Amino acid sequence: MKQYLLSIYQPDGDPPPPETLDPILRNLEALNREMKAAGAWVFAGGLHPPSTATVLRARDGEVLMTDGPYTEGKEHLGGFTVIRAPDLDAALEWGGKLARAIGLLPIEVRPLEDEADGCDRPPS
């Protein structure tokens, strides 16, 4: 089965208050249990705010480090789930369940490359 990345994008700023966030976290916990029971769940994680990021760039044989996010924007990657699914349609079903569990936040579904897809080649 292929693996898919379900990316959770959230607006910049403070997290929602507990009365908003707590039901979302309960929904996510239930969905993760469902994914695990179905054998779809591989890995999931939430990310700290973009302000905690460090960007590394190789230039002229040196590695330059910059504090802060790689890109500035009004939304950022807040978390992700990696799943196994037989095809894109099944992955989109899980992505839809994730979108419903979270509410207003957009979910992006992308297949991960495997060796047959050319994972051993440098990114273009």
Image: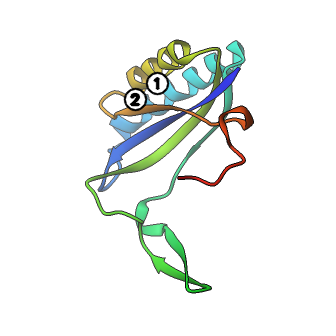
Give the left or right position of residue 83, taking residue 101 as reference. Answer: right
Q: Are marks 1 and 2 in contact (CB under 8 Å)?
A: yes
Q: Nearer the viewer, residue 36 or 25?
A: 36
For the residue carrying disc 2, how many other residues have a C-alpha within 10 Å: few (<14), some (14-19), or many (20+)?
A: some
User: Looking at the image, is 107 positioned above or below residue 100?
Assistant: below
Residue on which the image places disc 2? 102
Residue located at (62% from left, 85% from top): 61
- Element assignment for label 1: helix
Q: What residue is drawn where x is 29% and y is 31%?
A: 104
- The answer to which of 88 and 17 lies nearer the viewer is 88
x, y (%) of residue 99? 40, 25
- Residue at image position (39%, 38%) is 21
Residue drawn at x 46%, y 24% as measured from the top left: 98
Task: Say which element carries label 2.
Answer: helix
Residue found at the very far left of the displayed protein: 74
Q: Which mark is residue 98?
A: 1
Amino acid type at mark 2: Ile
Figure check: 72 above or below 45: below
